[in-house]
Amino acid sequence: MRCGLRAWVRRRPLTAFFAFTFVYSWGVYLPGVLQGLEVVELGLGQAAYTVLNVVGGFGPSLAAVAVTRLTGGWGGVKALLRRGVDVRGMSLRWWLIAILIFPALNLASIAVNYTLTRALPETNFPGGPLDVLLYLLAFLLPVGNHWREEYGWRGYALPAMQERHGALMASVALGLAWGVWHVPLFFFPTTQAVYGRIGVVSYLVMVVLLSCVMTWVYNGSGGRLFTAMVCHFLAGALDYFVVKTSTAYGLLIYIALEVALLAAVVLRYGPERMAQEVAG
């Protein structure tokens, strides 16, 4: 049985990665979904939902480690893990882009929305400035979404998908998978601060565009996984602290700006790589 599994993973590593990711994560999320839909009462409280969310969120990175172990041994696993912290030789330009691109998109959407409607976004700072500081420091904790997911999405899946389909098509396909993977969290009461204020379809559109922008940064930085982690973290932080959908047309404006950015990138570099440098 073990030899058969190893052989299947080696023949279809990308399929194995997605299968492991969804089976593991959705299996962990299932009790929360069943209670959230009132199918069954399991007595889950806020702490239990948080545990399910965190533990289930490790699916993509665990899948990447497992598949890499079966196809490339422990040496491959060590190389994968090192990529998440390796920033050697990265240019200042891509440091700035990774850090500033999503704050810039948010500020631009706020400015356009205010110009058109005189509306400002609702902000969410439950603990004041200290809350923001603690959130930023949480980037270093290995339980953050960027650590739990990015070794899988951009560390493992994206390079393989780009080789087959090019950067743009790979980004769209990966974004769809990434968005669908999150769907169970729409039924968790503890994640409604983010998922409860946006429909599934709108969320999928946003995640696909986010995936495309992150591919541009990833490829432009020379395939450095750390830049994907930074982008994932900052995009999530801004979605939590600045509620775009509370303003008139706020979400549509943000989406339009992302589409414009993506169009400029594709026109400049082409859909195959979407950046001048190549991912390593």
Image (cartoon, rainbow, N blue to C red):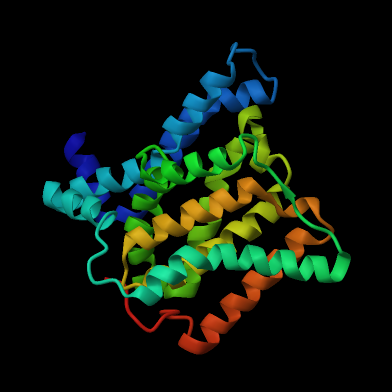
Q: Residue furthest bottom?
A: 268
**Residue 233, image x, y percentages:** 47, 51
**Residue 279, image x, y percentages:** 31, 72
**Residue 147, image x, y percentages:** 37, 45
Q: Quadrant of residue 110?
A: bottom right
Residue in view at x 54 percent, y 55 percent: 235
Q: Is residue 65 above or below residue 172?
A: above
Count of marks, rendered view: 0
The residue nearer to you, when weighing 127 against 73, is 127
Does the image show residue 268?
Answer: yes
Residue in view at x 37 percent, y 39 percent: 141
Q: Is residue 163 toward the left or the right of residue 73 in the image?
A: right
Does the image show residue 21?
Answer: no
Q: Is residue 230 toward the left or the right of residue 91 in the image?
A: right
Residue in view at x 48 percent, y 39 percent: 134
The residue nearer to you, when weighing 54 against 12, is 54
Q: Quadrant of residue 117?
A: bottom right
